[in-house]
Image: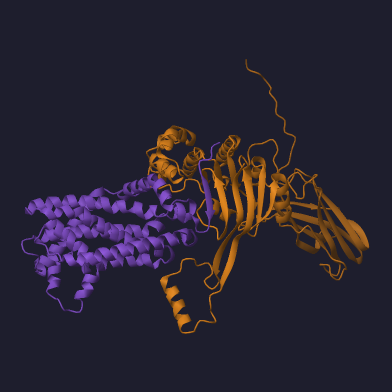
Chain colours: A orange, B purple
C-alpha cells in the first residue's frame, strides 16, 4: 500500500545576488531600495533576483514498510524534501499525500531548553514531537532508562555532557510510535556506541512494519538499513530503486576522481629537456557489478614517460597522499639504464589496504638515484569508498590504512 | 495497521485544517507556556518577587517626580500613588505581553526550522508570562489599596473585560510585529523604544483629566488616537471607582480599532507564517 505519494513537487527560493549571503535585511535596505527605484536610480546596482529551484518536479511513491535511503550531494534537495514532508515548509508546486502519523527527526533534542531539567525537557520535547501527555507519561521510565540519565533527571540539561544530551534526545524520539518516521542525518552526531544504538532502534522500527525515510551521507549505513534509495542531484530525483543499484550509480558519479592523464606527443607532456610524461593511469579492478573503488578494490597505477636523453640511469618514485595532505606511502622502482625512448612502469596497490577516503598521487623521475629531474604533482586522484561486511557498526573506521593482517583469535582455556 | 489520518501537502493547503490543528496542539501550547514561565525567573534570587519589585519601585519614582516635585494634580479623592500603580499594572501587562509576542517567533526559531505546528501557538503561549506577572502585581495593588482604604465599587465587574481588551490589543500589535521581526531585525530595536515612549504617552503617571483641560490644543485628538489611552483610563476607572477620569466615548473607537487591527494581524500572520522558515 502506498503511504506517501509525491506528485511533481517543486520548491523555489529567490536568491538576491547583490546582497549575497544576507538573508535578514534591515528595514533601511528595503526603504533605500524603494527610494532608488522611485528616483530611477540604482539601475546599475539593481538587485538580481535569481530563482533557485531546490526541488524540481519530483515524483515518487513510498509503500508501507519501505525503508528509503535518500542520498545526494549537499544542496541536492534532500533536506528540502524532508522539510516539505514534515510540513515545515510548503512546496511551490505539486502535492504530497501522506497516510499515517508522521514523526520527523531533523535534529536530536529539538526544542530542549538548557535551563529546564531533564524531566521537564522530556515532556517539552515529547510535546514538540507530537506526543500526547499520557503517551509521554507511559514511556517516561523507559526513556530515562534508555538514555541512562536517571541520576540527572532533576538537573538542568545545560549541565549535561554533550553525550548525555544527545542520548536523552534520541531516547525520546525512539519512543515515538509513528507510522512514518523521517530521519535526517541523526547518525552524524554522537559516538560510535550511540550510532549503534540508533541503527539498532531504526532496524526495530522498520521490522515492526513502519515506514522510514532516512537521509544520510553514510552510504554503508544506507546500504545496510534501506531496501530502496532515492538519488537526488540539483533538485531532481535522478534515480530511484534498489539500494545497491542506486548507491552504485551515485558513487560512480560523485567520486571526485581524475583517473588518468595522457599526453599525445612529448611536446605536450609535462617535464624537462631530459624527461617528459606521456601518461599516468589508475586502473581499479572492480568487483563484479561495482563501478566504484571501495576498500576491497585492488588498484594498478600505470606510468609512461619519454626519456629524451641518449642514455640515463633513471628510477621512478611515487607518493600517495591522503586528501588532507599526509603522505600515506612513498615507493620507488629500482634504478636502471634506459635508452632514448618510452619507459613504462606499473604499481600494484592491493585491495584491503587503503582505508576509505580521497587520495592523490604524485610521481617523480629521479636520475642517478639522487637528482630529481621532474616531479608530476597531484597527477591523479581517486576516492576509496567504505565497505563493510559482517559488522553492525558504521562509524568512521580509524587509520590511514585498513590492512587485513593475519589476526587470529581462539579460546585457549575453558573455565568450568 | 490502521491509518489514522491522511495529510495532503501542497501550496496553500495548510489553511484548511489550521484551526483544527491549533486545537489539536493545545497540549503543546500549555507546555510551551509552562516552559516560558519556569524559565522566566530561573537562577534569580528574588524570583517572582521581581513582578512586585518592578511596579512598586516604578510607583515610588513616579510619586517622587510627579507628585512631590512637579506637583501634578491627580483626580479628586484618589490617592496619587494608587492611581499610578493601577496605570503601571495595566501598562506592564500590555508591554510585557506585547514584547513577548513580538519576539516569540525569533525566540523559538529552532522550533520553526525543525518542526511543524500552527505557528500561532508561539505568540499565544508567550502571553502567559505577562499574565502571571500581572496577577502578582494585582495582589500588590490590593495591598496598597487596603493601606489607603480606597476600595473599588461596581465598576470592578468590568475588570475582566478590560483585561481581555488589553490582551486583544497586545495580540493585535504583537502579532504584526512578530511577523515583521522575522524579516527585519530592526523591530527588535524598535520595541523597547515603543514601550518607553508609550509609558509617557499614556495616562500612567498622570490622569487624562489634565489632558481634558487642553481641549482644542492640536495634540488633543492625537492623544486620543492612541488606543491604549482609553484602555488604561478604563482600567483605572474600574479599579479606582467613579472618581477616576474616564471618557467612555473614547472606548468605542478603541474597541473597533483593536478588533480591526487584530483581524488584520491574524490574517497577515497566517499569510506569512509558512515563509518564516525561509527568512528566520
Relative to B176, is A332 on the left or the right? Answer: right
On the question of residue B54 being in view, the answer is: no
Above or below, A68 relative to A75: above
Please state the horizontal and vertical placement of residue A187, each as a whole percent of the image. 57, 45
Q: Nearer the viewer, residue A235 or A195?
A: A235
Q: Nearer the viewer, residue A344 or A380?
A: A380
Please state the horizontal and vertical placement of residue A354, each as a whole percent of the image. 73, 47
Please state the total of marks drawn on the protein image. Answer: 0
Relative to A93, is B44 on the left or the right? Answer: left
Give the residue at x 35% y 46%.
Answer: B30
Quadrant for the N terminus of chain A in the image: top right
Give the residue at x 41% y 46%.
Answer: B24
Residue that sits furthest to the top in the current view: A416
Please state the horizontal and vertical placement of residue B196, each as a whole percent of the image. 26, 66
Give the residue at x 70% y 28%.
Answer: A409
Quadrant for the C terminus of chain A in the image: top right
Relative to A134, is A59 on the left or the right? Answer: right
Give the residue at x 71% y 45%.
Answer: A244
Please state the horizontal and vertical placement of residue B182, each as a whole percent of the image. 42, 62
On the question of residue A262 being in view, the answer is: yes
Q: Nearer the viewer, residue B203 or B161?
A: B161
Amino acid at each position: 500500500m502506498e503511504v506517501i505519494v509525491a506528485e511533481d513537487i517543486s520548491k523555489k527560493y529567490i536568491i538576491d545576488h547583490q546582497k549575497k549571503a544576507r538573508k535578514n535585511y534591515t528595514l533601511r535596505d528595503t526603504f533605500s531600495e524603494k527610494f532608488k527605484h522611485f528616483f530611477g536610480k540604482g539601475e546599475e546596482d539593481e538587485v538580481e533576483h535569481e530563482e533557485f529551484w531546490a526541488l524540481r518536479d519530483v515524483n515518487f511513491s513510498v509503500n508501507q514498510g519501505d525503508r528509503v535511503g535518500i542520498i545526494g550531494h549537499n544542496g541536492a534537495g534532500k533536506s528540502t524534501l524532508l522539510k516539505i514532508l514534515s510540513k515545515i515548509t510548503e512546496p511551490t508546486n505539486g502535492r504530497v499525500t501522506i497516510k499515517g502519523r508522521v514523526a520527523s527527526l531533523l535534529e536530536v533534542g529539538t526544542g530542549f531548553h538548557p535551563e529546564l531539567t531533564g524531566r521537564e525537557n522530556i515532556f517539552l520535547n515529547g510535546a514538540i514531537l507530537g506526543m500526547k501527555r499520557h503517551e509521554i507519561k507511559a514511556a517516561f521510565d523507559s526513556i530515562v532508562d534508555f538514555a541512562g540519565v536517571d541520576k540527572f533527571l532533576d538537573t538542568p540539561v545545560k549541565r549535561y555532557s554533550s553525550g548525555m544530551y544527545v542520548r536523552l534526545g534520541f531516547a525520546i524520539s525512539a519512543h515515538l510510535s509513528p507510522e512514518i518516521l523521517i530521519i535526517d542525518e541523526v547518525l552524524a552526531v554522537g559516538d560510535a556506541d550511540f550510532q549503534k544504538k540508533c541503527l539498532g532502534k531504526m532496524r526495530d522500527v522498520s521490522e515492526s512494519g513502519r515506514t522510514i525515510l532516512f537521509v544520510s551521507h553514510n552510504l554503508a549505513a544506507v546500504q545496510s538499513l534501506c531496501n530502496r534509495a532515492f538519488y537526488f542531484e540539483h533538485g531532481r530525483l535522478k534515480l530511484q530503486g534498489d539500494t545497491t543499484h542506486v548507491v552504485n550509480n551515485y558513487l560512480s558519479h560523485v567520486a571526485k576522481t581524475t583517473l588518468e592523464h595522457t599526453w599525445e606527443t612529448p611536446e605536450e607532456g609535462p617535464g624537462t629537456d631530459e624527461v617528459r610524461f606521456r601518461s599516468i593511469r589508475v586502473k581499479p579492478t572492480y568487483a563484479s557489478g561495482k563501478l566504484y573503488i571501495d576498500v576491497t578494490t585492488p588498484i594498478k597505477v600505470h606510468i609512461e614517460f619519454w626519456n629524451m636523453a641518449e642514455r640515463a640511469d633513471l628510477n621512478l618514485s611515487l607518493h600517495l597522499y591522503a586528501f588532507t595532505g599526509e603522505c600515506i606511502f612513498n615507493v620507488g622502482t629500482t634504478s636502471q639504464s634506459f635508452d632514448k625512448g618510452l619507459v613504462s612502469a606499473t604499481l600494484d596497490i592491493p585491495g584491503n589496504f587503503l582505508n576509505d577516503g580521497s587520495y592523490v598521487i604524485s610521481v617523480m623521475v629521479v636520475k642517478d638515484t639522487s637528482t630529481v629531474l621532474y616531479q608530476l604533482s597531484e597527477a591523479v586522484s581517486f576516492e576509496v569508498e567504505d565497505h563493510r561486511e559482517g559488522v553492525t557498526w558504521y562509524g568512521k573506521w580509524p587509520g590511514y590504512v585498513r590492512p587485513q593482517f593475519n589476526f587470529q583469535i581462539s579460546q585457549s582455556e575453558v573455565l568450568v | 495497521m490502521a491509518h489514522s489520518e491522511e495529510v495532503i501537502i501542497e501550496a496553500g493547503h495548510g489553511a484548511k485544517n489550521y484551526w483544527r490543528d491549533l486545537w489539536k496542539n493545545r497540549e503543546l501550547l500549555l507546555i510551551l507556556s509552562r516552559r516560558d514561565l519556569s524559565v522566566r525567573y530561573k537562577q534569580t534570587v528574588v524570583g517572582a518577587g521581581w513582578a512586585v519589585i518592578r511596579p512598586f519601585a516604578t510607583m515610588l519614582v513616579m510619586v517622587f517626580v510627579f507628585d512631590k516635585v512637579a506637583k501634578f494634580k491627580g483626580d479628586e479623592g484618589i490617592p496619587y500613588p494608587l492611581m499610578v500603580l493601577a496605570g503601571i499594572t495595566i501598562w506592564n501587562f500590555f508591554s510585557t505581553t506585547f514584547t513577548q509576542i513580538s519576539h516569540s517567533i525569533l525566540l523559538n526559531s529552532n522550533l520553526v526550522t525543525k518542526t511543524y505546528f500552527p505557528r500561532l501557538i508561539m505568540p499565544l503561549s508567550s502571553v502567559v508570562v505577562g499574565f502571571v506577572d500581572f496577577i502578582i502585581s494585582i495582589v500588590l495593588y490590593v495591598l496598597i489599596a487596603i493601606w489607603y482604604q480606597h476600595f473599588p465599587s461596581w465598576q470592578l465587574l468590568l475588570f475582566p473585560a478590560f483585561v481581555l481588551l488589553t490582551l486583544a490589543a497586545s495580540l493585535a500589535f504583537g502579532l504584526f510585529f512578530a511577523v515583521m521581526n522575522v524579516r527585519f531585525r530592526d523591530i527588535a530595536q524598535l520595541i523597547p523604544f515603543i514601550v518607553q515612549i508609550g509609558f509617557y504617552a499614556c495616562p500612567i503617571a498622570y490622569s487624562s483629566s489634565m489632558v481634558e483641560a487642553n481641549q482644542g490644543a492640536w495634540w488633543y485628538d492625537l492623544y486620543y488616537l492612541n488606543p491604549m489611552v482609553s484602555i488604561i483610563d478604563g482600567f483605572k476607572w474600574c479599579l479606582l471607582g467613579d472618581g477616576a477620569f474616564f471618557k467612555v466615548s473614547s472606548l468605542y473607537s478603541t474597541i473597533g480599532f483593536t478588533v480591526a487591527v487584530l483581524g488584520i494581524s491574524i490574517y497577515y500572520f497566517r499569510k506569512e507564517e509558512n515563509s518564516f522558515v525561509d527568512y528566520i
